[in-house]
């Protein structure tokens, strides 16, 4: 029979990691509770630019706040509250009037001062030009050995 030495420091470290995960789950849940709805997104690489599309049916541009950093995009939206008069006219509604905040990490740095946006039929499209260093360039290599 082998003798195994008990090391309480290892046990305490495992317990600390488990508590950290529990508290992280709790804080993630409380943060996401105020922003329970997230619009679906699509991110495409088109060579010299990234195209980020966000589905926002029924939203208007004036209710959106878009911030573009070099390596991330943050989109916030908040529907205006219905007035009391508007609420009295509704007999039944399954519509949600959410607010949201969504951050999207970009796979490559972009020139955030040259972003173009369009908002058509509930689809927000952001055209994010990449910085020069990350654009794939084709360079012809000369193999002529007569030089």
Image (cartoon, helix red, strand yellow):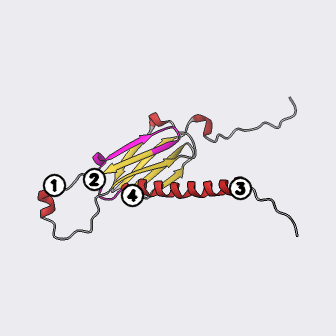
Please name the residue shown 45% across and 34% down the image.
Answer: 113
| SS class, disc 2 | loop
Q: Pointer 2: what residue?
A: 79
Residue farthest to the top, as pictured = 147
Give the extent of the magenta segment.
Answer: 56-73
CA neighbours of label 2 inside 10 A, class few (<14), some (14 to 19), many (20+): some
Between disc 2 and disc 3, whose residue precedes?
A: 3
Q: Is residue 52 magenta?
A: no
Distance (Cα) linking label 2 and label 3: 53 Å
Q: Read off the residue under disc 4.
A: 33
Decide if residue 146 is on the left or right side of residue 22.
right
Q: Give the crowd class for mark 1: few <14, some 14-19, many >=20 residues within 10 Å.
A: few
Crowd around label 4: few <14 · some 14–19 · many ≥20 (10 Å): few
Q: Nearer the viewer, mark 4 or mark 3?
A: 3
Check contact, mark 4 vs mark 1: CB within 8 A: no
Residue 83: percent from left, percent from top: 16, 55
* Residue position marked by numbered label 3 in the rendering: 8
- Which quadrant is the C terminus positioned in? top right
**Do the numbered discs 4 and 3 sit on residues whose CB atoms are within 8 Å?**
no
Side of 23 relative to 133 (left or right):
left
Q: CA distance from mark 4 to mark 1?
A: 24 Å
- Horizontal and vertical percent position of residue 119: 35, 50
Q: CA distance from mark 2 to mark 4?
A: 16 Å
**Mark 3 Cα within 10 Å, few/some/many (few <14, many 20+)?**
few
Q: CA distance from mark 2 to mark 1?
A: 12 Å
* Label located before the other in sequence (1 or 3): 3
* Residue at image location 43% in from the left, 59% down from the top: 40
Marks 1 and 3, Cα distance to the nearest angstrom?
61 Å
Total label count? Answer: 4
Secondary structure at badge 1 equals loop
Q: Name the residue tied to disc 1.
A: 83
């Amino acid at each position: 029979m082998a003798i195994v030495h008990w090391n309480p420091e290892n046990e305490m470290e495992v317990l600390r990691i488990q508590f950290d995960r529990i508290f992280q789950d709790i804080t993630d849940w409380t943060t996401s509770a105020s922003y329970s709805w997230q619009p679906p997104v699509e991110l495409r690489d088109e060579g010299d630019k990234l195209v980020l599309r966000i589905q926002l049916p029924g939203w208007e541009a004036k209710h959106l706040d878009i911030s573009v950093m070099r390596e991330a995009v943050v989109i916030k939206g908040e529907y205006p509250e219905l007035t009391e008069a508007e609420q009295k006219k509704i007999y039944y509604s399954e519509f949600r009037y959410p607010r949201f905040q969504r951050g999207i990490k970009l796979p490559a740095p972009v020139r955030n001062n040259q972003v173009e946006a369009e908002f058509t039929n509930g689809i927000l499209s952001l055209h994010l030009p990449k910085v020069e260093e990350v654009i794939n360039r084709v360079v012809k290599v000369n193999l002529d050995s007569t030089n």
